[in-house]
Image (spheres, coloured by chain):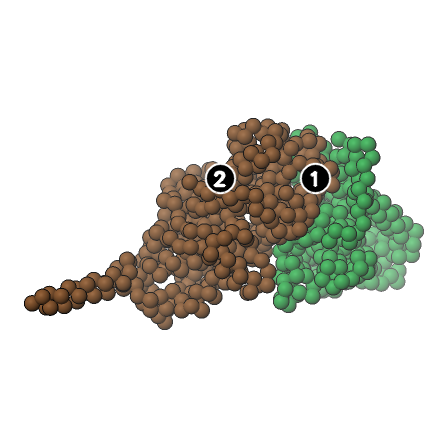
Amino acid sequence: MDQQIVNAIFIGSIYALFAVGYTLVFGILDILNLAHSAVFMLGAALTYSLVVNHGQSFWVACVLGIAASAFMGLVIEYVCLRPLRRRQAPPIAALISTIGLALIIVAVIEQGTQGSLFQWLWVDGANSVAFPAGTVPNPIWHVGDLTLEARKVAIIPITLALMLLLGYVMRYTQVGRGLRAVAENPRAARLMGLDVDRMIALTLVISSALGGLAGILFGVAIGDISPYIGRDNVEVRGLAVIVLGGMGSIPGAVAGGYLLGIVEVLALVTLGGSASGGVAFAALFLMLVLRPQGFFGTRLRERI
Amino acid sequence: MNRMRLVCWVAATLVIAACGSSGSTGGTNTSNAYAGKTIKFGAVLSILGAGGVYGPQSRDGALLAVKQINASGGVNGAMIDLEVQDDASLAATSAQKAQTLITASLDLALLGPTLSNSAVAVHPLAEQLKTPILAVSTTGIHIVPDCNWTAASPNSTPCKYVFRDSLGEQTAIPDNIKSYAADAHPSTGVLLVAQDDKFSSDGGKIVQDTVGQYNIQLLKTIPFSKNAADLTPYVTEAVQLHPDVIFITSLGAIPAKIMTGARNLGFQGQFLGGNGFNTATVSKQAGAAGKGARSASAWYIGNTFASNQDFVTAYKNEYNKDPDQFAAQGYTGIKILADAAKRANLTFTDLAGDRDKLRAAMESVNIQTPLGPFQFTSTHDVKQTVWIIEMDGAGGFKLDHQIQQS
């Protein structure tokens, strides 16, 4: 059981890191950015490709992967969201627009094979790949009955440090205050002299950078990078996490991530593998019915 | 008079010989009987999605066979045109693509689909539309012979138009377990089975039904979803039971992830699996963690059948890499269809009639292939040598045993 708790904390960290990107955008814009899972995948795929196909060091590739993910945040804003905002389109239009972008990103990676138009980006098509052994040192420690892999353990402090940093930025910096003002009331923020469009773009850049980083950490720790890791492995769980924690709440996303990780593993141990797979959906459903605002969510003004 | 009789005998002999040389399919099957025509075949394969680990090799093998046949004059002078459609590993897409190939492209016969999950949707369609379809990688239960497609509407009527050149798990998994039990005498096992596709769940049932025959106690069956973000909790469950063997029935990259996770957790036993192991992609993904992982395969690169050596050489020349089981089965699929087409006396004017003639000719295929001498059983399944192989830890396989099916 001890090992399973470690497993739960580890996967909870991935969920939390991924879900923070979701919740950040929801908190500011009141929309779900469903391209987030594709950015998660893109961060991992691009970093892998830079290491394996372009001979870059892992750390350089990481920086470039996160930078590319952040850039995708700008693409989401300028291509999917801002034009719709200008036309005062309903939130559902933005949601569908981001789904469209996600499909395009996944399709581009899928089509990346040797000799294809996208071979500079990805050459493994639909295949799942993993970073070559030794790309990231991975000593394995045995502590009592526990087996601890360094690259999995490292995710936990990275996640917590990033969440603390994000919390600090949101609460104590000029940028954070600006973002919170936009979340509270965009019109009032504009009247107060804030460049709301710039703040929204910044939100998407931060969110996408976090999503890309989460993808890289997932790829390193799980050893599974394919065009489908965002869509199949984390997207629905990310939604469950932000519903559990409270939509728009950063502490809620962190707590929800760990909670879902623990609940999934507990379900596996106590109810068996068949039940474990449905836990995210059950949690999503129950929370929406019993406490729609989640554990940490209250009112819009308190989301950030 | 004697001279006249001799001339008559010689003339009669020449006439009979001439008739005989026109073949066993009715006298019009000369080597250029189809000259100027095109024989259209279709293939529904999984290039993207979970089956993307297998489908591209099937496609490459099939295209190589088409290229070779066309370069050597075609099928009785007709060129083969193979249209490959990607079903993205989705059953509904697979059925839609198959329907298009059958009813819009008017293909004579189809290969595929890659996954058993998709075959459940596609094969009934081909049967209904009376179009021969040859499964080149599907290995689940009921793919052939009885077309028992769904538990909800079981149908034990033998398939008429569905054939298979891939080794069914009902043969492969028991042969593998029997072989490993004889070699290593394992006493306990745990089964990790993906519960969301037919191939994997069928494999799990076969493992459950087989292990007892070889005195292996199945300590636990652990089902999982292929979409689990992390399989480590499932693998931990398995490893903590300290089994001698972990059975894995799943597709794509998952077996490799399980192997790596289990080794990291200190598992010292062995992995046994099915056709899902049998591609270099999976062996490479597993790396050192997969060393010794065993499966039964329809094909082995080092098999000494003459046609296999030719195939391996041609494939390497064409694609600059080694073929795998799926490439060999795709290649064989086209060779089978071409041989049947050659003997079928196709009219090229009556598609329904030609499809039926092709189907009938497929039943009597008897050719040399990379899989060995090839014939279908009376229920359209494959009867062939089984190769017990194990991953070599470096992305390849080595041969453990060769089992000749009686």
For image coordinates 69% across by 44% down, the residue present is B289
Q: Which residue is mark 1?
A: B262
- Viewer-proximal residue among B203 and B301: B301
* The image quarter in which residue B224 lies: top right
Q: Amino acid at mark 2?
A: Gln
- Viewer-proximal residue among B123 and B394: B394
Residue B272 image position (x, y, % from top left): 60, 39
Q: Chain of mark 2?
A: B
The alpha-carbon separation of the residues under discs 2 and 1 comes to: 26 Å
Dot 2: few (<14), some (14–19), or many (≥20) neighbours within 10 Å? some
Q: Is residue B299 left or right of residue A97?
A: left
Could one spot residue B350 in this view of the protein?
no
Identify the chain drawn in brown: B
For image coordinates 60% across by 45% down, the residue present is B390
Could one spot residue B174 in this view of the protein?
yes
Q: Is residue A254 left or right of residue B36?
A: right
Q: Which residue is mark 2?
A: B170
Q: Colour of chain A?
A: green
